[in-house]
Amino acid sequence: MTFLSRFEAVLFDLNGTLAVDFDRFGGHQDYYDTYSRLGGTQLSPAAVDQAVETSLGRCLQRYDEGPWDPFPEFGEFLRVDDPDEQLLLEDTVAEHELGWVSEERLTWLTHLAGTHQLGLVSDVWAPSRRLRAYLGTSKLADLLDAIVISSDVGAVKPSGRVFGLALRQMRTDPRSVVFIGDNYHRDVEGAAACGMATVWVSEERNVPGSVVPDRIVARVEELF
């Protein structure tokens, strides 16, 4: 019997757990190139850089300090008067925030979906439209019985509301669910508080709090 066979359902975090090459932010990033590819023409490179970096700073401060429920829409951190430019800048941030799931992991998830309900509980700051488009084109959405994205919900992990939504979508008891995530505080503590088993994806073996994960793995492949 494998560890995952003990459960009826598996919930995953996305960025840092399933997805790689996410959160491409910082001074070395060309936000203006992304903005231009999305159709933006009105703002200068400096204005785009300032808008992205300033809004991210405000968002990250709230993400770190809380409260986590409710959590504002990204537009409240962006503060752009022109609604068309607001959408373009939100999509610019979303494009840099978005990661991708390898073919190897998609194959594994396809096999796992034959025996388990699968779900996703993901914290993203930007509106979810680009992430949902990726989930559709990658066929990952076809494998998932529950998709909960924080920017749709107005709350971020470790809020129990985001985990509870996924459990309701799957119509399953939390005791039959394992949550797999890379952030100890948000994923492990948050899911455990809702009654789920947990897997912490980390190379660290010293647990930083009182909640002991059921498993600690360096990469999700160790559960394959």
Image: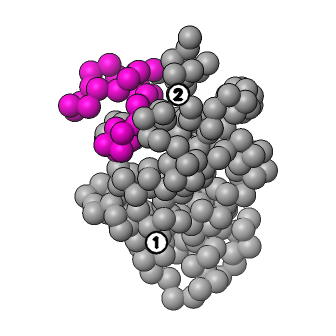
Please tell me in which quadrant of the rendered image residue 61 appears.
bottom left
Q: Is residue 69 above or below residue 189?
A: below
Span colored in magenta: 190-217
- Local crowd at mark 1 within 10 Å, few (<14), some, or many (≥20)? some
Left or right: 27 as drawn, with respect to 35? left
Residue 20: % across, % down: 59, 37
Whether residues under marks 1 and 2 lie with C-beta atoms below 8 angstroms apart, the answer is no
Residue 198 numbered mark, or none: none
> In the rendered structure, does residue 209 fall within the stretch colored magenta?
yes
Q: Earlier in the sequence, mark 1 or mark 2?
A: 2
Residue 100: tell me if it is visible: yes
| Residue type, mark 2 in image | Phe
Judged from this view, the residue extending furthest toward the bottom is 81
- Local crowd at mark 2 within 10 Å, few (<14), some, or many (≥20)? some
57 vs 126, nearest the viewer: 126
Q: What residue is rendered at 56% in x and 11% in y?
A: 1
Residue 124: % across, % down: 50, 56
Residue 3: % across, % down: 51, 18
Q: Which residue is mark 1?
A: 73
Secondary-structure class at tag 2: loop
> In the rendered structure, does residue 97 fall within the stretch colored magenta?
no
Quadrant that contains the C terminus: top right
* Label 1 – label 2 distance at C-alpha: 34 Å
| Residue type, mark 1 in image | Glu
Q: Is residue 201 above or below residue 15?
A: above
Residue 169: % across, % down: 57, 53
Judged from this view, the residue extending furthest toward the top is 1
Q: What residue is rendered at 52% in x and 28% in y?
A: 7
Residue 7 numbered mark, or none: 2
Secondary-structure class at tag 1: loop
